[in-house]
Image (spheres, rainbow, N blue to C red):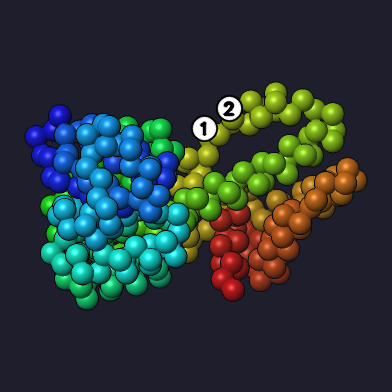
Amino acid sequence: MTTTTTPVTVLGLGAMGSAIAKTFVDRGHRTTVWNRTASRSAPLVDAGAAAAATAAEAAAASPLVVVCLLDGTAVDEVLAAVEGAVAGKVLVNLTSGSPARARANERWARDRGADYLDGKIMGDPPYVGTPNVMFAFSGSRSAFEAHGSTLRQLGTVAYHGEDPGSAAVEFMAQVAVGYEFLIGFLHTLRLVQAEGVDVAEFAERVAGSLAGYPPLLTSFGKAVKSGEYGPDLGSLDVQAALMDDMISHRESLGVESVRMREVKELMDRRIADGHGDQGFSSLFELLAR
């Protein structure tokens, strides 16, 4: 039990919303829940939550109203239903969505007398309430200062500033890094499997090499911020000499090579522009549309 037990409402009881509500109940918060399919409230009521008959009734019950739904369309529908009940409340939206949608939601809340925090979740429902789930928040600073201790009970929390879209920027960028890395990894597994290599054993070796990447990522960030690109990974003149072999190796085995062709094209363009002495991080300069 915590000493700070702000009453909380949770709108949306999918797997993540249920985990959030259960965490609040377990930490001693008077928790009101609502879900379009009312039967999903039953386990939480058994745990000590109160179920509201309508979304508006649930929103009226607590100063802190947490929304966790499938998508932006569902959020729009629920916001329309609670429009007359959010004045004076802090509205926290934990639904995945774009920075533009977060900013629009903040304007909606402000016009109705509510403070708004946009939140994004990086982690899985079973780990809510532990440090293994990351919550990024942005929006009203006063709302975060007032309710940060409550929100920190959900996991590891970071506040990204008063722009309500900043948490979504962080979330989408973090997820994109994962997808970019993992699709490249799957391409490589296809390559080594085609050569008869045990893919599980290869994956273990790659996992062991990942410890070398954090310093490289940090150096890339500094180079991009400053615009000063040293020869990280070696100069592009040297790196580019590998690319034809990388591409032909894949194509000889029937493995898709579009990603390597993109890298070669960027390297060739950067070298042609007179920057062959710079490193891989300098390809950043070519990535604006």
Seen in the picture, residue 25 relative to 60 is either above or below; the reply is above
Tags 2 and 1 in contact by the CB under 8 Å rule? yes
> Where, by quadrant of the figure, is residue 149 drawn?
top left
Q: Is residue 76 above or below residue 125?
A: below
Observer able to see residue 10? no
Q: What amino acid type is highlighted by mark number 2? A: Gly
Q: Secondary structure at mark 2?
A: helix
Residue drawn at the location 66% of the way across and 61% of the way down = 276
What residue is shown with label 1?
Answer: 211
Q: Is residue 68 left or right of residue 240?
A: left
In the rendered image, the residue lying farthest to the left is: 3
Judging from the image, what secondary structure is the residue with disc 1 in?
A: helix
Quadrant where the C terminus is found in the figure = bottom right
State the residue at coordinates (38%, 33%).
127
Could you tell me residue 71's position as x and y percent? 45, 59
User: Which residue shows up at 58% across the image and 49% down it?
Assistant: 179
Could you tell whether 32 is left or right of 130 in the image?
Answer: left
In the depicted view, which residue is nearer to us: 80 or 135?
80
Of residues 75 and 255, the one drawn nearer to the viewer in this rendering: 75
Instruction: Compare residues 164 and 24 and report the one nearer the observer.
Output: 24
Marker disc for residue 32: none
Estimate how packed mark 2 is, as few (under 14), some (14 to 19) or many (20 or more) residues with alpha carbons within 10 Å.
Answer: few
Q: Amino acid at mark 1?
A: Ala
Left or right side of 283 for 257: right
x then y, percent, for residue 4: 10, 39
